[in-house]
Image (spheres, helix red, strand yellow):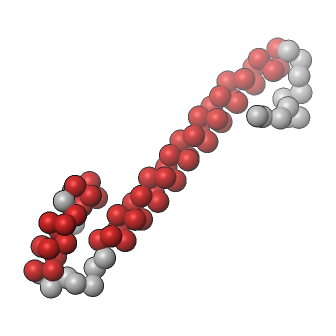
Amino acid sequence: MLDIKRIRENLDCIKKAMERRGEKDFNLDEVVKLDDERRKILQEVEVMKNELNTASKNIPNLIKEGKDVENERLN
């Protein structure tokens, strides 16, 4: 099994090696494309986690101010 980092760094070399072994039906470009999508989704998840953490940290302040935490809109 090849590591995705190795595939990305040596894409052409690995393609040639796979062709020499008779693996012509395997699409490494699709693997890289899917990994790009995965990375993008992971970045979006991290942004959402940070927003959630920030909102969670603000809850005690809202309670101290006497605001209704459940009805407070997050921006």
| Quarter of the figure with residue 57 | top right
The residue most toward the top is 64
> In the image, is residue 43 above or below residue 1?
above
Q: Position of residue 74 (x, y in %)?
A: 78, 34
18 horizontally vs 3: left or right? left
Q: Residue at x 52, y 53 (%)?
A: 41
26 horizontally vs 68: left or right? left
- Compare residues 61 and 35 and report the one nearer the observer: 35
Q: Residue at x 49, y 52 (%)?
A: 40
54 horizontally vs 65: left or right? left
| Quarter of the figure with residue 21 | bottom left
Q: Residue at x 69, y 29 (%)?
A: 56
Q: Residue at x 10, y 80 (%)?
A: 20
| Quarter of the figure with residue 6 | bottom left
> In the image, is residue 70 above or below residue 26?
above
The quarter in which the N terminus is drawn is: bottom left
> In the image, is residue 8 above or below residue 26?
above
